[in-house]
Amino acid sequence: MAATRTPARRRARRGSLERPVNGRLYRGAFFVLSLPLLILAFSVIRPTVLTAPQLPPSFDGEATKALAVDLTKLPNRAPGSSQSALAAQWFKEQIAPYGLPVTKDVWREDVSGLGPVTLRNLWAVAAGQSNDAIVVLAHRDDTGTGPGANDNASGTAALVELARAYAQTSPGEPVRSSHTIVFLSTDGGSFGGLGAVRFVEHSPFHIVSLIDLDAIATAGPARVVITGDRPRSPAPALVQTAARRILEQTSAGPEHAGILEQLIDLAFPFTLYEQGPFIARGIPAITVTTAAERPPPPFLDRPELLDGAKLGAIGRSVQQLIGSLDQSPDPAQGSTSYVWLGGRIIRGWAIELTLFGLLIPFFVGVVDLYAHCRRRRIALTPAARSLRSRLSFWLFAGLAFYAFRLFGAWPSGAARPPNPAVVDSGNWPMLALLALAVVLLVGWLVARQRLVPRRPIGNDERLAGDTVGLLGLAVVSLLVLATNPYALIFFLPALHAWLWLPQVRNGRPAARALVLAVGLMGPALLFWSLGSRYGLGFDTPWYLLELAAVGYIQVPAVAISLGATACTAQLVAVAAGRYAPYPERDERPARGPLRELVRTVVLTLRARRRVTEERRRAFGG
């Protein structure tokens, strides 16, 4: 007897409720990308390198190392400590023999992890023929948990040694540089670059370029950091000249963040170094260091580990860089955005154009999906109201978070990145977190009354839920495009993957889970970058919350993220079979969600009280 064959499952017809996405139209829209990619290819340029100065460098590495070791005799230079004021006096005494006038700026600041403390900036000025200033910066404070030898006694000592070349102790008219050279010693550098922010906001100089020296005495390779607090990059001439001067003095070009890491830094501007506030305000600025993205931990930051040879090589590189900038009439004006490939750069506007081009296929697909629903007369209003309920809950969650912040429940401080080595990002007040959880639970129970399925949901209603969720993501992507186009790299995987959720809705659960997971690659990219590059690990979510609590992540970015979360929740609900359109009037209970919640709580308490009384009577009897 012949075995019976199971009939093959027929593929759904194109354009049906099971295959509503027009794949041909979606794929054809990628043709639009050919122009942005062509422009991107032709936007790659090789920046100019400023001419090297004629005089050889005179930077003394061993003498600088001795200065750094001397500063480590004040191991606790954290802002507000007694040795912080002594460190400021030490810097002033070291500069005094060179005849350079020193100015002090003292102010109070709320420092994350320390509270309100007094901070001090000091700067020595070598007056030049022009009022345009080239600033060399190094923070002299440390975390207070170690001697701070490399971070940042090395940079402070190099600052003093660089100032020696501009000493004005000889009789007669001294030789003046073309530009004014400012040697800036900041406070609060280990706590978010507070001194740098203070100086850039109250600077008496017209700054044309800035060089930050931070942790420059380890045996590791030199690095150049170009990340800003905004999606900007320093002038290419400054970066390329710094790389050439380092190559000449160390026989190796400096390391820098890779292409993907630079894109992430533009999409989510974040840095622990002090060039960030200057770049954000359009001032060309870089940090020269031999450390990683995160400064060295205290147990590796001891005086005996300082590398005098590397310190000397970096110091000579910076001295030559200052000379190159000084002899140029227009050293490095302005800031732009780009991705640095070593000898070349890719223009930022070309990258933005390409990211916008990647949106077009998604927009074509989702608009066609909307038209498909209109042709089939599928009502989208209930799905839109369902998304509105989800959006209301997530915005309520954001408002609750900021309300708790207003009452001082969360870690506070200036709107700067807290130092991960000082602040325990996972150690939030448990009582306040429990209170927030209760508030959010109440809000969710109220919103849930309109979101739970009350009847079987048809394929047309599920398609409406997907379509509205994708339209919501389209609106979110436009908001991202208007605020920071580079941040689209966190959203593009979700846009292109989740467009196909209606297509796999009736397929295997593993296929839906895979599509959802691919869409989450964008946020995962941000978590991976912060967790690995800055050593945050599993504390990354807490650290992001802390950045929002202190105001470094601004409210518009938080609101856009919450909107994206609401759209994601709707798409996940449809994929998981838990979606329900907003109920019609005859489907709603007699009482609204808040009254129903109060009634449920009251009835539950009465039932518990009745059970307690019955047990008491039974025990007494």
Image (cartoon, rainbow, N blue to C red):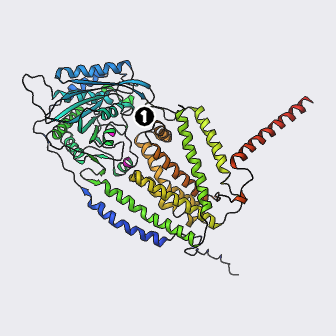
Residue at horizontal 78 percent and vertical 42 percent from the top: 603
Height in image: 6 above or below 167? below
Measured as percent of width and height from the top left, residue 234 is found at 28, 45
Q: Is residue 304 magenta?
A: no
Measured as percent of width and height from the top left, residue 236 is found at 24, 48
Label 1 neighbourhood size at 10 Å, few (<14), some (14-19), many (20+)?
many
Residue at horizontal 67 percent and vertical 54 percent from the top: 452
In this orientation, does residue 489 appear? no
- Looking at the rendered structure, the kind of residue marked 1 is Pro
Height in image: 387 above or below 117? below
- Residues drawn in magenta: 265-276
Residue at horizontal 16 percent and vertical 40 percent from the top: 324
Quadrant of the rendered image containing residue 93: top left
Our reading of the magenta stretch's main secondary structure is: loop
Measured as percent of width and height from the top left, residue 527 is found at 46, 46
For the residue pair 29 and 618, the one nearer the viewer reads as 29
Quadrant of the rendered image containing residue 271: top left
Measured as percent of width and height from the top left, residue 239 is found at 24, 45
Quadrant of the rendered image containing residue 205: top left
- Count of all numbered marks drawn on residues in the image: 1
**Is 583 placed left or right of 147 in the picture?**
right
Q: Is residue 268 magenta?
A: yes
Dot 1 lies on which element? loop
**Is 378 placed left or right of 240 in the picture?**
right
**Residue most toward the bottom?**
1
In this orientation, does residue 336 appear? yes
Figure quadrant of the C terminus: top right
- Residue at mark 1: 418
For the residue pair 483 and 492, the one nearer the viewer reads as 483
